[in-house]
């Protein structure tokens, strides 16, 4: 299995802040990395696929970058609806997820 | 619009078999890959397995000995069976569509169903 490690596990931020979340793979996964947002009581929602491609209907304040083993999800100018848990997932081999990053209000 | 809906018992006794069904609308299960994912309370996501191409399957190695995913194309449904459950199998279970071909991603999800393993 390819292990996915996210950091930080939790962060506090204010509305309007720029937020960066990191995901590291235990081996190179090219750009086969996706990001999801999960709000309480809801299923995860796909935000970014193939490391940097924005899923349709996802706001442009979300962006992704990286390749190989290191990836980032950036949210520019955080909005109240962005407080949630974010997961990365690799698709280079059988799918595995990162442990999640909880974004909370400062 | 693709929609998925899980159904099945919310309570299963230890050592018994967990059985869930996912009903798909807006897409045929003869295309794409159709997956089960679970999330223990307060924890992360674990891929269980998927079914694709008229019955081919792939499972998480850690669950392979206990899992079967099957399909009913006439009903546009696919199902999960997890045998010999323990309290560690208590989780929210989601069905989801997986794009299959690279880059593989889960783009449509059901709302999830909570399954508790308890006597």
Image (tube, rainbow, N blue to C red):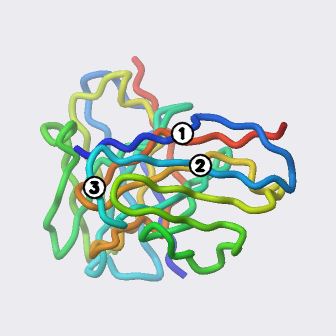
Marks 2 and 3 belong to one chain: yes
Quarter of the image with the C terminus of chain B in it: top left
Residue wearing tag 1: A7
Mark 1–mark 3 CB contact (< 8 Å)? no
**Residue B40 placement (x, y as % from top left):** 47, 33
**First in sequence: mark 1 vs mark 2:** 1
| Quarter of the view holding residue B21 | bottom left
Residue visible at 39% across and 50% down in the picture: B37
Subunit ID for the residue under disc 2: A
Q: Secondary structure at mark 1?
A: strand
Quarter of the image with the N terminus of chain B in it: bottom right
Q: Secondary structure at mark 3?
A: loop
**Residue B60 placement (x, y as % from top left):** 22, 46
Subunit ID for the residue under disc 1: A
Residue wearing tag 2: A21
**First in sequence: mark 1 vs mark 3:** 1
Seen in the picture, residue A65 relative to B29 is either above or below; the reply is above
* Left or right, B33 with reference to A64: left
Residue wearing tag 3: A28
* Left or right, A19 with reference to B35: right
């Amino acid at each position: 299995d390819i292990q996915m490690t996210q950091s930080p596990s939790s962060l506090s931020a204010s509305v309007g802040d720029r937020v960066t979340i990191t995901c590291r793979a235990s081996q190179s996964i090219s750009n086969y990395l996706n990001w999801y947002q999960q709000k309480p009581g809801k299923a995860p929602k796909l935000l970014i696929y193939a490391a940097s491609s924005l899923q349709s209907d996802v706001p442009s304040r979300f962006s992704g970058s990286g390749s190989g083993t290191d990836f980032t999800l950036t949210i520019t100018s955080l909005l109240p609806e962005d407080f949630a848990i974010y997961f990365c997932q690799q698709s280079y081999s059988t799918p595995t997820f990162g442990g999640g990053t909880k974004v909370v209000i400062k | 619009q693709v929609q998925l809906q899980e159904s099945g018992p919310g309570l299963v006794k230890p050592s018994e078999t967990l059985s869930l069904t996912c009903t798909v609308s807006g897409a045929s299960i003869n295309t794409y890959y159709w997956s089960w994912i679970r999330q223990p309370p307060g924890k992360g996501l674990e891929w269980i397995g998927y079914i694709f191409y008229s019955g081919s399957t792939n499972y998480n190695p850690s669950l392979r000995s206990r899992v079967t995913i099957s399909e009913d194309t006439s009903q546009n449904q696919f199902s999960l069976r997890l045998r010999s459950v323990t309290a560690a199998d208590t989780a929210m279970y989601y069905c989801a569509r997986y794009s299959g071909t690279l880059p593989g991603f889960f783009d449509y999800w059901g709302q999830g169903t909570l399954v508790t393993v308890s006597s």
